[in-house]
Amino acid sequence: MTSIAVIGPGAIGGTLAAWLAQNPEFEVLVCARTPLPDLVVETPQGKITAAPEVFTEPLQVRPVDWVIVATKTYSAEATAPWLAGLCGPDTRVAIVQNGVEHVRLFAHLVPEERLVPVMINLPASRLAPGRIVQNRHGIIAVPSGRNGDAFAALFAHTEIEAAAHADFLSQLWVKLTGNCAAIVPALTLRATGPVWSDDMEALIRALVEECAAIGRAEGADVHHSVVESTIETMRNMKEGAIAGSIHADRLAGNPMEIDARNGVIVRLGEKHGIATPANRMLVTLLTASGTPWLPTS
């Protein structure tokens, strides 16, 4: 029996926990702030349910084989008490978060050789505690190697496509390049498509090209087609559409992952001597918007 604990049963963590719990060879635990009766996820394949053991206090937990951290990036420190109780000498910790700095945020909490950074594309939304809608097919990417290969294998009997990649760095930066323009609708609270103009295209292009340039400086392969497809996606964004979690969080009045999604572009731009004026400007404006925000550094 493989034991798996999920910290943070929101839209992503709850969906992963529910899918993993479909395997009778897995013992799935959930670490939450409030009790959950069960998990119900409406997936593209139909409804799945699970009744994992739920813990609300770190002192209640025991060491497990795997920990999946599915919290927001700004909550990394808040996972420390949970990790202290869940991690034994052989426990591996998968970090399912946005951005490109998974290991940096957790290396002081768990030995780096037991950390598995995870890139995920899993469009899902939480309707209520334990009630989730998974909108499309899920994709997971992890670094190749013993730990990454083992984590990907956990999802072999789910509909989530999990694979290990030798060039995992590029997977992270391609995703960030595709996501970084969402800061515009997060700031304007308006879909970009209905207000598209030459000036809007120039702003979106600047944001995305800056991100791609930093990714390349970090050693990632970010093809120009990623830039163009991101611009096209923003051009075709329909009225009322939500451009990812940063936009949804602002609409809900929740803290936003500004640093993990766009602040990191500015910070690493300074490291490489690459100017990032578009990202810097929107990070400054969104941070000053009055919406609660907690930085990751």
Image (cartoon, helix red, strand yellow):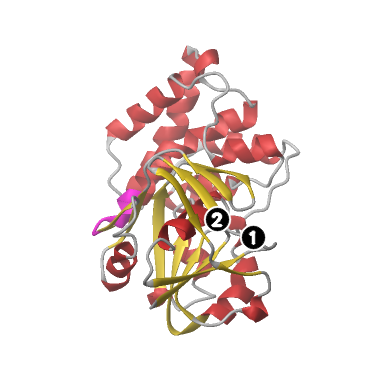
Q: Work out which quarter of the rendered image holds the C terminus and state it.
A: bottom right
**Residue 152, position in %: x, y?**
31, 62
Distance (Cα) linking label 1 and label 2: 8 Å
Q: Work out which quarter of the rendered image holds the N terminus and state it.
A: bottom left
- Which residue is rendered at x = 47% and y = 13% of the image? 198
- Which residue is rendered at x = 62% and y = 67% of the image? 77
- Which residue is rendered at x = 52% and y = 59% of the image? 70
Question: Which residues lie in the magenta part?
Answer: 165-171
- Of the numbered discs in the image, which one, if any, rests on residue 36? 1
> Relative to residue 35, is residue 244 drawn left or right?
left
Amino acid bearing label 1? Leu
Residue 155 or residue 108, whichever sits in front: 155
**Residue 273, position in %: x, y?**
44, 47
> Relative to residue 52, is residue 78 drawn left or right?
right
Residue at far left of view: 166
- Which residue is rendered at x = 58% and y = 53% of the image? 10
Verify whether residue 68 appears in magenta: no
> Relative to residue 265, is residue 216 drawn left or right?
left
